[in-house]
Amino acid sequence: MQKSYGIEAARAQLGEIADYVRTSGETIALTRHGRPIAVIGPTKAVKPAGGVEATLYYPHTERTCVLPALPRTGEELVQDEELSPTESTETRWIITEVQWHLAVDSSPSVGITLDPADDHTRQIMKQQEADRIAAARARRTTEQ
């Protein structure tokens, strides 16, 4: 059986698809215009909606968080960025890639690649990288 079906084509085969996923343990994606919008799978493999746990891949680091929904490539993510314990600012990131992996034997995973969306965010990113390099140099100097 196919691993994904267009939503219209799946309607005619819904019973067949449901029987297949129940017996095989696999999940099948339902798509609209080639983009996955839902999955059909055994109840143990598909978790109810309520947030999407995702790993955000920034140019300089990565973080895991829960998003209210799965974003699309090209959308913007706005985030409060902590500069110091007493200072924070808003950063804007453009989503350049969204990857997901569904598996029966493990939890689904989502990875989102981000790039700075404005000059303010690029400046903050450059400063954080400079601070990271300075801290690494200071550690190396004290170790010697």
Image (cartoon, rainbow, N blue to C red):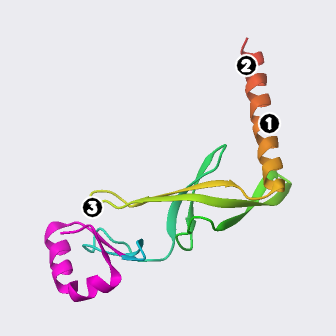
| Residue 18 among those drawn in magenta | yes
- Circle 3/circle 1 CB separation < 8 Å: no
Residue at disc 2, secondary structure:
helix
Q: Residue furthest right?
A: 87
Foreground: 47 or 3?
3
Q: Residues within 10 Å of mark 1 (few under 14, many from 20)?
A: few
Q: Is residue 18 left or right of residue 132?
A: left
Q: Is residue 35 left or right of residue 135?
A: left
Residue at disc 3, secondary structure:
loop
Question: In the rendering, at what x and y percent does residue 64 appear?
Answer: 56, 55
Considering the image in quadrants, where does the N terminus appear?
Answer: bottom left
Q: Residues within 10 Å of mark 3 (few under 14, many from 20)?
A: some
Q: Residue at x 40, y 72 (%)?
A: 34
Considering the image in quadrants, where does the C terminus appear?
Answer: top right
Which comes before the other along the chain, label 3 or label 1?
Answer: 3
Instruction: Tell me the amino acid under the disc marked 2.
Output: Arg
Q: Which residues are magenta?
A: 1-30
CA separation in Å, label 3 and label 1 = 42 Å
Tell me if residue 100 comes above or below residue 11 in the rendering: above
Tell me if residue 71 comes above or below residue 98 in the rendering: below
Q: Residue at x 83, y 48 (%)?
A: 123
CA separation in Å, label 1 and label 2 = 14 Å
Can you identify the residue that label 1 sits on? 131
| Residue 74 among those drawn in magenta | no
Foreground: 96 or 48?
96
Residue 81 quadrant? bottom right
Residue at disc 1, secondary structure:
helix
Instruction: Tell me the amino acid under the disc marked 1.
Output: Asp
Question: In the rendering, at what x and y percent does residue 137 appear?
Answer: 76, 23
Which comes before the other along the chain, label 1 or label 2?
Answer: 1
Q: Residue at x 51, y 72 (%)?
A: 51
Can you identify the residue that label 3 sits on? 104
